[in-house]
Image: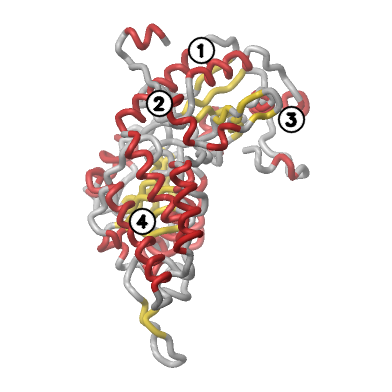
């Protein structure tokens, strides 16, 4: 690490230590071990600013929105719509009504597949995805193709875990009605050239959905600069609450979508014998009582990272990724997958030859280190590497070099365990419910 810093490849960062007091959960201990939380690609911890925003909403404003003509309801409505506009500014959307609140990325992709997808895709058409997609940006399109008679086209991933732009461009053609691509891989942290991919698709008149779940915690996202037609992400990965996410869509595209769900808040009025008149987006796509506190908490999370500064966050990402690479490369039998140093995005995935990833994850857990082991809901991607799974280190603003050094020391003593001995090539044990969430 010293060599990398002195060479100018990266610079030092004190962000991790300075922000740790902002995150109450980091005070926890597991026996003699402090919590070392390195599973941020799955979900991040929450700073006091977000927790305070949630508590303040429930203590001071709690009421349903758009339903009541009394002060508290109107205050809740104003807070909810202010949160929407805050997200609009954060991702540089042009209009607030281009921001639709959803329960998360998975819900956003399913919403789009069941509205835009069903109206645009029919038998003989194609939907293009890449081989690195999370199941949440693979399965909705696969199901759409299976039910409509369309074809799912998967652009293969190269040996370093990258999608070559020429291979992506070659998959586009007159039959393609939509392309859906990850901005950043949740397995390797690979950054796709989404701006170029969108440009290639637009030359064929093809709209593009970008799964930004792993991008928004690590880099500023400008949907207008990308020219994304649709962009989605989850709040809980950027220090916000669980159960809230965003589907951004260009106004002219969102306005064409039929309601995904129907019910309260989606209609102007209902009779038993006249056609239903639906309200405009985004309310038309937010049936029922929304996660009002979640939206407010998500806006607070974006405020928090913007106050830290994207330059500082990215410098910190660089430091941790390079420190992890140096630590892992010093350990016998450890292999890093992909090229996380190319554009550091807070993720480093590795395997320990001869030891099942679950045994590695369990060993680290006994040292108080929380990591994700398995296929990371990206089976197709893992298959391209011929691995049963990986161990993933994923970083946040509160992680430190000292935590990475603890990982290094713990890995030096890892030994084969139950999974290696009894199920060396298994990913799931269907008869054991305790293993079902280990991936």
Residue behind mark 1: 329
Disc 2 secondary structure class: helix
Disc 4 secondary structure class: helix
**Number of the label disc, if any, that sits on residue 15:** 2
Mark 2, other Cα within 10 Å: few <14 / some 14–19 / many ≥20: some
Q: Closer to the N terminus: mark 2 or mark 1?
A: 2
> Distance between the Cα atoms at labels 2 and 3?
41 Å
The image shows a total of numbered marks equal to 4
- Whether residue 291 is visible to the viewer of this picture, yes or no, is yes
Q: Height in image: 50 above or below 58? A: above
Residue sitting at x 54%, y 15%: 405
Residue sitting at x 63%, y 12%: 412
Residue behind mark 3: 423
Disc 3 secondary structure class: loop
Q: Where is residue 94 in the image (x, y as percent from the top left)?
A: 23, 55
- Residue 15 or residue 372, whichever sits in front: 15
Residue behind mark 4: 83
Q: Closer to the N terminus: mark 3 or mark 4?
A: 4
Camera-nearest label, 3 or 4: 4
């Amino acid at each position: 690490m010293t060599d990398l810093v002195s060479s100018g490849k990266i610079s030092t960062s004190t962000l991790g230590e300075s922000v740790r007091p902002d995150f109450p959960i980091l005070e926890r201990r597991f026996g003699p071990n402090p919590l070392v939380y390195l599973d941020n690609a799955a979900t991040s911890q929450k700073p006091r600013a977000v927790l305070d925003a949630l508590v303040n909403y429930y203590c001071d404003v709690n009421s349903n929105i758009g339903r009541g003509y009394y002060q508290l309801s109107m205050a809740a409505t104003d807070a909810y719509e202010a949160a929407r506009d805050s997200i609009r500014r954060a991702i540089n959307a042009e209009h607030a009504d281009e921001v639709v609140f959803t329960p998360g990325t998975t819900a956003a992709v399913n919403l789009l597949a069941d509205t835009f997808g069903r109206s645009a895709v029919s038998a003989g058409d194609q939907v293009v995805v890449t081989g690195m997609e999370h199941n949440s940006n693979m399965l909705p399109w696969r199901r759409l193709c299976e039910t409509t008679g369309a074809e799912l086209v998967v652009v293969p991933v190269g040996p370093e875990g990258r999608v070559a732009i020429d291979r992506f461009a070659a998959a586009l053609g007159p039959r393609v009605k939509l392309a859906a691509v990850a901005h950043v891989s949740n397995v390797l942290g690979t950054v796709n050239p989404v701006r170029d991919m969108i440009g290639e698709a637009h030359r064929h008149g093809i709209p593009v959905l970008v799964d930004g779940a792993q991008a928004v915690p690590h880099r500023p996202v400008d949907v207008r600069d990308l020219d994304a037609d649709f962009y989605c992400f989850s709040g809980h990965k950027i220090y916000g609450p669980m159960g809230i996410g965003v589907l951004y869509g260009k106004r002219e595209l969102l306005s064409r979508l039929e309601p995904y769900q129907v019910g309260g808040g989606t209609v102007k009025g209902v009779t038993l014998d006249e056609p239903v008149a639906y309200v405009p987006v985004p309310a038309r796509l937010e049936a029922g009582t929304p996660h009002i506190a979640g939206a407010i908490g998500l806006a607070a999370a974006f405020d928090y990272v913007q106050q830290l500064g994207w330059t500082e966050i990215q410098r910190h990402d660089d430091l941790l990724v390079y420190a992890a690479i140096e630590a892992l490369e010093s350990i016998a039998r450890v292999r890093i997958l992909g090229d996380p140093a190319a554009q550091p995005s807070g993720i480093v995935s590795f395997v320990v030859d001869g030891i099942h990833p679950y045994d590695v994850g369990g060993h680290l857990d006994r040292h108080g280190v929380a990591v994700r082991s398995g296929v990371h809901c990206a089976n197709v991607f893992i298959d391209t590497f011929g691995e049963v799974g990986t161990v993933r280190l994923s970083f946040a603003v509160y992680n430190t070099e000292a935590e990475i050094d603890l990982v290094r020391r713990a890995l030096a003593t890892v030994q084969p365990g139950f999974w290696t001995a009894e199920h060396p090539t298994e990913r799931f044990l269907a008869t054991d419910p305790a293993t079902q969430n280990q991936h």
